[in-house]
Image (cartoon, rainbow, N blue to C red):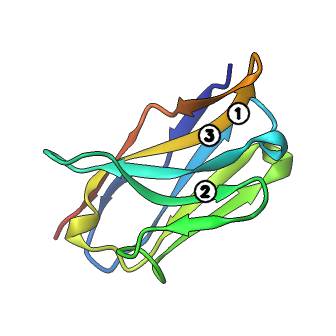
């Protein structure tokens, strides 16, 4: 089992920045994959940015050059730095990890944090 606790969402004006944090109950060094997804009202959940244990990244075209995924292994925490925010970035953001549990890869989710971009 892995518990994930998110923080950092809120209301920000267009062009502003926010940083989301996700603290893992398990060391993030051994995880198969970690990253962020988001879900806007009436939309399906979509990938924002992920990185595998081997270092392969996958980032949505809509956020490339604006959002940065980073990590602090000593704190079992990873982050999503969001810059130049746009109204279309408004969504609930979820952190996600994939970890081996009982011999199989299982996906775990944070509770979600609301990000609203509006003037």
Q: Dividing the image into 4 quarters, which one contains the C terminus?
A: bottom left
Residue farthest to the bottom, as pictured: 65
Compared to residue 75, the image places residue 79 above or below, namely below
Mark sitting earlier along the chain (1/2): 2
Q: Are marks 1 and 2 in contact (CB under 8 Å)?
A: no
Compared to residue 14, the image places residue 56 above or below, namely above
Disc 1 on helix, strand or loop? Answer: strand
Real-space Cα separation, disc 3 to disc 1, in angstroms: 6 Å
Q: Nearer the viewer, residue 94 or 105?
A: 105
Residue at x 69% of width, y 65% of height: 56
x, y (%) of residue 102?
75, 16
x, y (%) of residue 39?
29, 47
| Badge number at residue 79 | 2
x, y (%) of residue 82?
46, 69
Residue at the disc numbered 3? 97
Mark sitting earlier along the chain (3/2): 2
Q: Residues within 10 Å of mark 3 (few under 14, many from 20)?
A: many
Mark closer to the observer (3, 2): 3
x, y (%) of residue 30?
83, 41
Residue at the disc numbered 1? 99
In this figure, what is the number of numbered marks?
A: 3
Q: Are marks 3 and 1 in contact (CB under 8 Å)?
A: yes
Is 36 on the left-hand or right-hand side of 26? left
Indicate the quadrant where residue 87 lies. bottom left
Real-space Cα separation, disc 3 to disc 2, in angstroms: 13 Å
Q: Residues within 10 Å of mark 1 (few under 14, many from 20)?
A: many
Q: Nearer the viewer, residue 29 or 113?
A: 29
Disc 2 on helix, strand or loop? Answer: strand
Real-space Cα separation, disc 1 to disc 2, in angstroms: 18 Å
Is 87 on the left-hand or right-hand side of 108? left
| Badge number at residue 78 | none
């Amino acid at each position: 089992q892995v518990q994930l606790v998110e923080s950092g969402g809120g209301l920000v004006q267009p062009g502003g920045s926010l940083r989301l944090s996700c603290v893992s109950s398990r060391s993030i060094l051994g995880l198969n994959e970690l990253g962020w997804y988001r879900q806007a009202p009436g939309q399906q959940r979509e990938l924002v940015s992920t990185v595998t244990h081997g270092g392969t990244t996958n980032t949505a075209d809509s956020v490339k050059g604006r959002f940065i995924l980073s990590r602090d292994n000593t704190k079992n925490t990873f982050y999503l730095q969001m810059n130049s925010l746009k109204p279309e970035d408004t969504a609930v953001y979820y952190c996600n990890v994939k970890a081996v549990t009982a011999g199989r890869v299982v996906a775990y989710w944070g509770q979600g944090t609301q990000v609203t971009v509006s003037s």
